[in-house]
Amino acid sequence: MVKSFTSEKTIKAINNRNTKEVNMLLQSPPAISQFVRRIFQDHNGHLWMGTNGDGVVRYDGKELTYFSVENGFAGGAVRGILEDKDGNVWFGTNAGLSKYDGNSFTNFTSENGMVGNNIWSMLMDRNEIIWIGTLEGVSQFDGKKFTPFALPAGEVDTGRGVSSEKVVHSIMQDDSGKIWFGTSAGAYIYDGKSLTNISENDGLINNAVNDILEDKDGNIWFATHYKGVQRYDGKTFVNFTADGVPEHLEVWSLFEDSNGHIWFPAENHGVYRYNGKSFKNYLEEDGLTTNAIQCIYENKQGQIWFGGYQGLFRLDGERIVGVKKNGPWG
């Protein structure tokens, strides 16, 4: 169930005793969910939105459908969505793994062999193996059985609400086939035989890695929890935050669009887009009504979507518009 909340604009209107504005804000269409943390489009063109407590929401081009624990879904919080070659959609949740075959859900937990149920990251590699990063470590799933994959333990991050020595926040496969893991001890790279670690000792700006991205030119980008964004070309690091652009430090995710632009949200300071030369910062004056965006996604139609606190948003030209239960969908 979506919990009600009062927006900052409504609070300001109440404090200013602007009755007309308060009524307009309170009567505004409801958000899809209070918090959207993952966005994904399947082969049918359906848009899936993983929430932070309402399960998953599907938009099929006409209407919204909500799937929760009561509908057979694994958990309330969704932190990963992907699709396999057979069209099954997989969801990583706070209470296990869910597979949707178009009709019903099949759920997998530690009882089926996963190392943990609290999932924070997912990847389907080029061999259709699903890698699952949890609070308790990593599992591989070949469609039949789960196999634990050992990573060295890091440290509990006391600056986060949820942390552990084994949590994996991001899993990415690069163009050469290597698997990258974002952990509290920096990044680990698996080449199929052995592990290599990149940490602050090697020039990484911060060991608390939230996300890893390989861009179209083969550069590796790191989103860190305390020191912003960094780019690595295999030899040298470029730390944009240290140069003051952007100047905000807590970055949760990275996304490259079809134009090769790199997008990322900065906690308490909107969304950034990097076009290879300069940064564009989208803020409240650009239509963004929240400072807590967590995910960015481009659908097959070329639309850029944002998910976070206050729900779902969409880029319309150079303006950001909120997408409520009744749209606008574009």
Image (cartoon, rainbow, N blue to C red):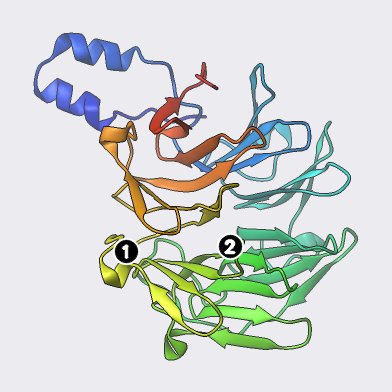
Judged left or right of residue 3, residue 22 is: left
Q: Nearer the viewer, residue 165 or 259?
A: 259
Count of residue discs: 2
Describe residue 288's horizontal placement relative to residue 329 as left or right.
left
| Type of the residue with mark 2 | Asp
Q: Do the residues bearing badges 2 and 1 touch, measured as CB atoms within 8 Å? A: no
- Asked which quadrant contains residue 217, the reply is bottom right
Q: Nearer the viewer, mark 2 or mark 1?
A: 2
Inspect this view and state whether residue 165 appears: yes
Within 10 angstroms of label 2, few (less than 14), some, or many (20 or more) residues?
some
Q: Is residue 200 above or below residue 211?
A: below
Crowding near the residue tagged with mark 1, few <14, some 14–19, many ≥20 C-alpha atoms within 10 Å: some
What's the residue at 78%, 31% (across, down)?
A: 44
Q: Nearer the viewer, residue 156 or 290?
A: 290
Q: What residue do we see at 10% from left, 17% from top?
A: 17
Left or right placement of residue 231 versus residue 249 in this view: right
Q: Is residue 40 above or below residue 249?
A: above
Q: Is residue 118 visible?
A: no
Task: Indicate the position of residue 48 as horizontal and vertical percent values.
Answer: 64, 36
Residue placed farthest to the left in the image? 16
Disc 1 secondary structure class = loop
Amino acid identity at mark 1 = Leu
Q: Is residue 15 above or below residue 278?
A: above
Q: Residue 128: horizontal and vertical position, in percent?
A: 84, 60
The relative height of residue 291 versus residue 109 in the rendered view (above or below) is above
Question: Which residue is identified by label 1?
Answer: 249
222 to the left or right of 9: right
Q: Residue at x 51, y 67 (%)?
A: 221
Give the x, y percent position of residue 112.
Answer: 81, 61
Q: Residue at x 61, y 60 (%)?
A: 121
Residue 15: quarter of image: top left
Identify the residue position indicated by label 2 in the image. 215
